[in-house]
Image (cartoon, helix red, strand yellow):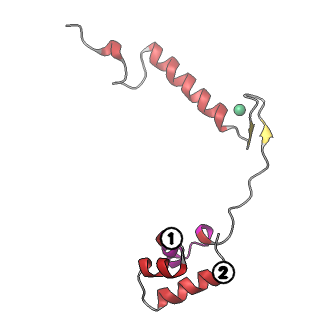
Amino acid sequence: MYDQSVVNQIKELLLAGLSYREIAAKTGVSRGTVAAVNRDQPRVYGQSTPQLAPPRRCQGCGHRVCLPCRICRARRHLKNALAQRRRGDGPPGRSRSRRPAA
Ligand SMILES: [Zn+2]
Protein backbone atom coordinates (compact mmCIF):
# COMPACT_ATOMS: atom_id res chain seq x y z
CA MET A 1 0.00 0.00 0.00
CA TYR A 2 1.42 3.36 -0.97
CA ASP A 3 0.97 6.87 0.31
CA GLN A 4 -1.21 9.11 -1.82
CA SER A 5 1.67 11.60 -2.17
CA VAL A 6 3.81 8.87 -3.76
CA VAL A 7 0.95 7.97 -6.09
CA ASN A 8 0.55 11.63 -7.07
CA GLN A 9 4.30 11.89 -7.68
CA ILE A 10 4.16 8.80 -9.92
CA LYS A 11 1.25 10.33 -11.87
CA GLU A 12 3.18 13.57 -12.37
CA LEU A 13 6.24 11.70 -13.60
CA LEU A 14 4.06 9.64 -15.95
CA LEU A 15 2.62 12.86 -17.37
CA ALA A 16 6.17 14.20 -17.72
CA GLY A 17 6.87 11.25 -19.99
CA LEU A 18 9.38 9.31 -17.89
CA SER A 19 9.67 5.56 -18.35
CA TYR A 20 8.34 3.08 -15.78
CA ARG A 21 11.93 2.18 -14.97
CA GLU A 22 12.95 5.80 -14.33
CA ILE A 23 9.88 6.48 -12.22
CA ALA A 24 10.42 3.31 -10.20
CA ALA A 25 14.02 4.32 -9.52
CA LYS A 26 13.00 7.86 -8.46
CA THR A 27 10.13 6.89 -6.20
CA GLY A 28 11.35 3.56 -4.83
CA VAL A 29 8.31 1.54 -5.94
CA SER A 30 8.33 -1.38 -8.35
CA ARG A 31 7.75 -0.99 -12.08
CA GLY A 32 4.61 -3.06 -11.61
CA THR A 33 3.27 -0.45 -9.22
CA VAL A 34 4.07 2.33 -11.69
CA ALA A 35 2.18 0.36 -14.34
CA ALA A 36 -0.78 -0.09 -11.96
CA VAL A 37 -0.88 3.65 -11.30
CA ASN A 38 -0.72 4.25 -15.05
CA ARG A 39 -3.67 1.90 -15.60
CA ASP A 40 -5.37 3.50 -12.59
CA GLN A 41 -5.90 0.31 -10.62
CA PRO A 42 -5.98 1.68 -7.09
CA ARG A 43 -6.57 -1.77 -5.59
CA VAL A 44 -2.98 -2.66 -6.47
CA TYR A 45 -1.26 0.37 -5.00
CA GLY A 46 -3.70 2.20 -2.77
CA GLN A 47 -6.76 0.94 -0.98
CA SER A 48 -6.62 -2.26 0.96
CA THR A 49 -8.46 -5.27 -0.39
CA PRO A 50 -12.07 -5.62 0.78
CA GLN A 51 -12.43 -7.38 4.11
CA LEU A 52 -13.54 -10.98 3.95
CA ALA A 53 -15.87 -12.40 6.54
CA PRO A 54 -13.88 -13.49 9.58
CA PRO A 55 -12.70 -17.10 9.51
CA ARG A 56 -15.00 -19.67 11.08
CA ARG A 57 -14.48 -23.24 12.23
CA CYS A 58 -15.38 -25.58 9.36
CA GLN A 59 -17.76 -28.41 10.29
CA GLY A 60 -16.19 -30.66 7.68
CA CYS A 61 -12.45 -30.48 8.36
CA GLY A 62 -12.11 -28.48 11.56
CA HIS A 63 -9.84 -25.83 10.06
CA ARG A 64 -10.49 -22.16 10.66
CA VAL A 65 -11.44 -20.91 7.21
CA CYS A 66 -13.47 -18.34 5.34
CA LEU A 67 -16.59 -20.25 4.36
CA PRO A 68 -17.34 -21.92 2.04
CA CYS A 69 -14.38 -24.12 2.93
CA ARG A 70 -11.93 -24.55 0.07
CA ILE A 71 -10.02 -27.26 1.92
CA CYS A 72 -13.13 -29.45 1.98
CA ARG A 73 -13.83 -28.60 -1.66
CA ALA A 74 -10.32 -29.59 -2.69
CA ARG A 75 -10.54 -32.83 -0.70
CA ARG A 76 -13.92 -33.68 -2.27
CA HIS A 77 -12.49 -32.96 -5.70
CA LEU A 78 -9.43 -35.14 -5.05
CA LYS A 79 -11.58 -37.96 -3.68
CA ASN A 80 -13.84 -37.87 -6.73
CA ALA A 81 -10.86 -37.78 -9.08
CA LEU A 82 -9.25 -40.78 -7.39
CA ALA A 83 -12.51 -42.74 -7.37
CA GLN A 84 -12.99 -41.96 -11.06
CA ARG A 85 -9.49 -43.15 -11.86
CA ARG A 86 -10.03 -46.39 -9.95
CA ARG A 87 -13.20 -47.05 -11.94
CA GLY A 88 -11.16 -46.43 -15.06
CA ASP A 89 -13.21 -43.57 -16.46
CA GLY A 90 -10.92 -40.76 -15.36
CA PRO A 91 -9.03 -38.50 -17.75
CA PRO A 92 -6.81 -40.58 -20.06
CA GLY A 93 -3.05 -40.58 -20.11
CA ARG A 94 -2.32 -40.72 -16.39
CA SER A 95 -2.76 -44.41 -15.75
CA ARG A 96 -0.05 -47.09 -15.99
CA SER A 97 -2.65 -49.80 -16.58
CA ARG A 98 -3.40 -48.37 -20.03
CA ARG A 99 0.07 -49.27 -21.28
CA PRO A 100 -0.38 -51.99 -23.94
CA ALA A 101 1.02 -55.42 -23.10
CA ALA A 102 4.24 -56.21 -24.96
ZN1 LIG B 1 -13.47 -27.68 5.71
Q: Which mark is residue 8?
A: none
Q: Quadrant of residue 10?
A: bottom right
Relative to residue 7, is residue 82 depicted above or below?
A: above
Q: Quadrant of ligand 1?
A: top right
Per the image, the residue denoted by label 1 is 30
Q: Magenta stretch?
A: 32-44
Question: x, y (%) of residue 40?
Answer: 55, 76
Q: Is residue 1 magenta?
A: no
Q: Given the image, on which type of amino acid does mark 2 rest?
A: Gln
* Element under disc 1: loop
Question: Based on the displayed image, in which of its 4 quarters is residue 71 positioned?
Answer: top right
Query: Earlier along the polypeptide chain: callout 1 or callout 2?
Result: 2
Q: Residue furthest left?
A: 102
Distance (Cα) linking label 1 and label 2: 16 Å
Which numbered disc, 1 or 2, marks the residue closer to the eye? 1
Callout 2 secondary element: helix
Q: Which residue is the site of mark 2?
A: 4
Q: Residue at x 57, y 22 (%)?
A: 79
Proximity of marks 1 and 2: CB atoms separated by less than 8 Å: no
Dot 2 beta carbon under 8 Å from ligand 1: no
Q: From this view, report whether residue 85 is shown above or below residue 34.
A: above
Residue sitting nearer the eye, 15 or 73: 15
Question: At 76% from the left edge and 30% from the top edge, which residue is drawn?
Answer: 62
Who is closer to the viewer here, 55 or 1? 1
